[in-house]
Image (cartoon, rainbow, N blue to C red):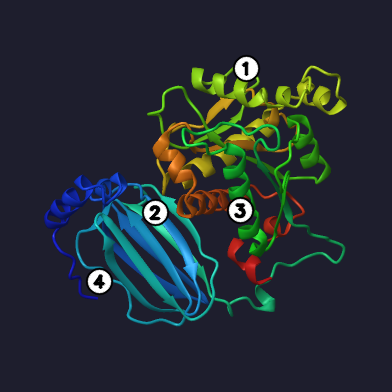
Amino acid sequence: MKNNTPTVSRRKFLLQILAAAGTLPNLAFADIQPKNKLVNAHLSENKGHAKVVFYLKNNPNYQIFTLTDPNRLVIDFYQTILTTPITTIPTAGAFVRRLRYASHHPGAIRVVLDLAGPANPISSVMLPGSGSDYYRFIVDVNHPDSISENSKPILKNDEKLRNVIVAIDPGHGGKDPGATGKYGTHEKNIVLSMGEELSDLMKDDKGINTFLTRDRDVFIPLGERVQIAHQQKADLFISIHADASIDRNIAGSSVYILSPHGASSVMARKLAERENSADLVGGINLSSKDPLLASVLLDLTQSATINSSGKLATHLLESISRTEKIFSPRVERAGFAVLKSPDTPSVLVETAFISNPAEEHKLCTPRFQSNIVHAIRAGIHEYFHHNAPNGTFIAAFSQDYKQLQEF
């Protein structure tokens, strides 16, 4: 495919003029500052599976999604330039019919794979080493007709497999609006919208069931949210929020897990105090002798659960960082009441700072909400790919996670 993209310097000049006139957001201007280089790519197909490997100078910032009518796989590499034309991609294959690429806006590369049918791509990133000086972004694409009876896992006659269960917890609700932005946006409404979208998105993920702790504007005490997850026998608990700070310039996403030994930072401690005060809005006393909370408090030191929460949080943070700005590059820890489950890996995702006017606007946009939702879903997939509970379909397909989608 011939690349007729104008030079970066000319585009930069035009964008400077438009940005000065207020026609373009600052993000468009920032995108023209490339931080990465796509060096080459390689496609291989074997026994009904296609694999595309992209070689990059640095860790990729990307978004991946599928389209239908016709079936396509789209990968956007942000803040990335192409150094040379991709030469090792065949023009046609059994499943990947064609690969196209172009700079669809300055500082970004869009790669489109035309597919023979629907697909459930699984992506991963390999660090430099093991014979390569580049970061390798790997996309496994499953051929829809590749799963035969012989390729399914061998199960015992009495072995009953189950789906993993993910609890999605939109924070706040009802009389508790959560944080409120400068322009009147309530946290409770934004996170409910994202929670519902995440639940809808994952309905098609075989091997995974989801449920919402709240599906409407209603107040639910923190301890009751934990109890709901236990009653539903959740394997994961994902609480979705929008951060707030006195400093309105602070921006970015963060991921938190429970800390039984104090917060990892001053901001983490203050955030936990604010989130934990939600029960006070509803007149709930956290010090009451609730049997569940009592047992939770006794089991806070269960290192296995906290360790699993850390693994989940790491996958989520890495996934979100590929498309959105990160406030804290590490997994933060604090004593969040909503994360005090004795046996369920639990994380709290602060999607953005609603106290930042620019991020408040971004939180209200479908594009940002979709980016966060897809990133959370990808992080959940990565976690289960390596940490699926025994007795689940995902664990049974652990040798080839992609096959589960066709089981």
Using the numbered discs, state the Cα–Cα distance from disc 4 to disc 2 in whole angstroms. 21 Å
Give the x, y percent position of residue 98.
Answer: 37, 78
Task: Give SS at disc 4.
Answer: loop
User: Could you say which is closer to the camera, residue 377 or residue 121?
Assistant: 377
The earlier-in-sequence mark between 1 and 3 is: 3
User: In the image, is 227 to the left or to the right of 204?
Assistant: right
- Give the quarter of the image for residue 178: top right
The earlier-in-sequence mark between 2 and 3 is: 2
Q: Residues within 10 Å of mark 3 (few under 14, many from 20)?
A: many
The earlier-in-sequence mark between 4 and 1 is: 4
Q: Nearer the viewer, mark 2 or mark 3?
A: 3
Q: Quadrant of the C terminus?
A: bottom right
Task: Give SS at disc 3.
Answer: helix
Residue occupied by mark 1: 261
Give the x, y percent position of residue 341.
Answer: 74, 32
Residue occupied by mark 2: 62
Residue occupied by mark 4: 87
Label of residue 212 in the image: none
Three-letter residue code for mark 4: Thr
- CB-based contact (under 8 Å), mark 2 and mark 1: no
